[in-house]
Image: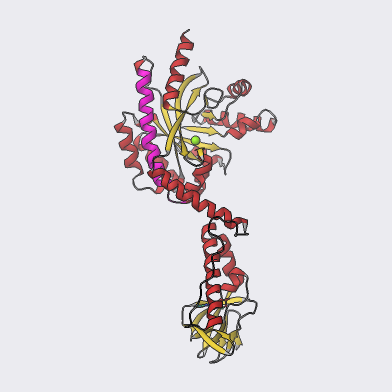
Amino acid sequence: MSIGQFTKKFSAGEIIFTEGEIGQCAYLIDQGRVEIFVDKKEERTPLARLGAGEIFGEMAIIDGGPRSASAMAMEDSELTVVSKEQLTERVSDADPVVRLLIVMLLSRVRDGIKEVGKYGKHKEYVPKEVTSTHDLDHLDDKTSKEVLNRIRFESELKEALTKNEFSVHCQPIVDLKDNDVAGFEALMRWNSPTRGLVRPDIFMGIAEESSLIIPMGRWVIKKACEEFMKIKDALSMFDRPVDHLFMSINVSGRQFNDPQFFKILNNATKKYGHRPEQIKLEITERVLVTGNMVEAWIQRCRDYGYTIALDDFGTGYSSLSYLSRLNVNNIKIDKSFVHGMEDDPNTMIIVKSIATLANHLNRPAVAEGIETEKQLKVLKKLGAAYGQGYLFCKPMPVDQLIEFLLQEEIEAAA
Ligand code: CMP
Ligand code: MG
């Protein structure tokens, strides 16, 4: 064997490594052929013959176990050394589901090799008994359990969409000048037969990890437009003005790539009788780091006439340059600031600065999560233009919300 820094040469018949050893690196075959084999009771059983372009010796590196088999150069061969870091960094950066699958597959390959070793390649072989038939308790690794539960959750979500288990609740957004309802935010709820009513912060993250967010996002656009029409119709019947009202719909970064996004949005807006400026798309500040596409996407929305709110402002990688560059209509101050304000003078200063900045840039701020009269008073003083929170009204199914809104009118009229 001759050793370069990144390549190694092995002569025909030379052993590259032996079963049971600790692995230091994997190899990529540049030239030559390598036999992978196991020895049991002096019988050598070949598992594979590999050629140029194939990698071997990766298993011990990835799962940390011993070499599952031996490797021998079948002819003079040249191999590129693939370092431990090269493999492990990639594996640890991978999606948790992918990581779990790799570990599972490697364990299956190892079991298979053990059986071949025991019985010889062509002898009959009794499959390994299943460890468990009903739960994940045999998995001692906590992350594996979490990953599997996520996969389950994802499948349930997929089913929920086909079984129509989602609904939209709406929460009023109030103009703080006069405490009048200015619009609503459509919030998705999942009424799961097994889990009960699930809030979007629980399931949205999982939906966003997969492409499931695309059909869910499409559904919520249509549903929000429909619910908005119901609200407007009901209020109009009581001669309440509705023309100034808007409906906010949350849009996830992945939906920027949905080729049908604008078609669905335009159709729904038209079908349910709204003007585009009555539909406000809320995009989270976190998507801004994903690059230029966002700017173009926002502009496209504005060209159609829709309005945009920058959601969760202050929780991600807020950059002030975004605020002037992006053509958004409002900024939503995250509820964590509103809640933190009372105990922390610094938070109060931040809220005041965001509200002032927002007003000066003509992107009036919406303060989220207002729960107490005191918070409301402070926010008004700090210059927040709009407010949203339990103090005014919690998110409700539209029928209830309509009742609430009409009730409010009766009270206001009394
Ligand atoms: P590792 O366990 O590190 O060392 C032995 C290597 O042989 C293993 O990684 C794989 O790269 C390779 N190997 C094991 N089983 C097979 C197989 N059935 N077919 C091809 N290659 C294998
Ligand atoms: Mg929102």
Would you place residue 173 above or below residue 25 in this image? above
Would you place residue 306 above or below residue 24 in this image? above
Q: Is 353 on the left or on the right of 211, as rendered?
A: right
Q: Is 41 on the left or on the right of 342, as rendered?
A: left
| Residue 71 location (% of width, % of height) | 56, 84
Q: Residue at x 52, y 84 (%)?
A: 120
Q: Which residues are magenta?
A: 210-236
Locate residue 399: give its quadrant: top left
Q: Nearer the viewer, residue 60 or 321?
A: 60
Q: Nearer the viewer, residue 1 or 55?
A: 55
Residue 334 in view (yes/no):
yes
Q: Residue at x 54, y 88 (%)?
A: 44
| Residue 105 location (% of width, % of height) | 52, 67
| Residue 217 location (% of width, % of height) | 41, 42
Q: Residue at x 43, y 16 (%)?
A: 406
For this orientation, the residue located farthest to the bottom is 12
Would you place residue 401 above or below residue 317 in this image? above
Please, which colouring scheme is shown? secondary structure
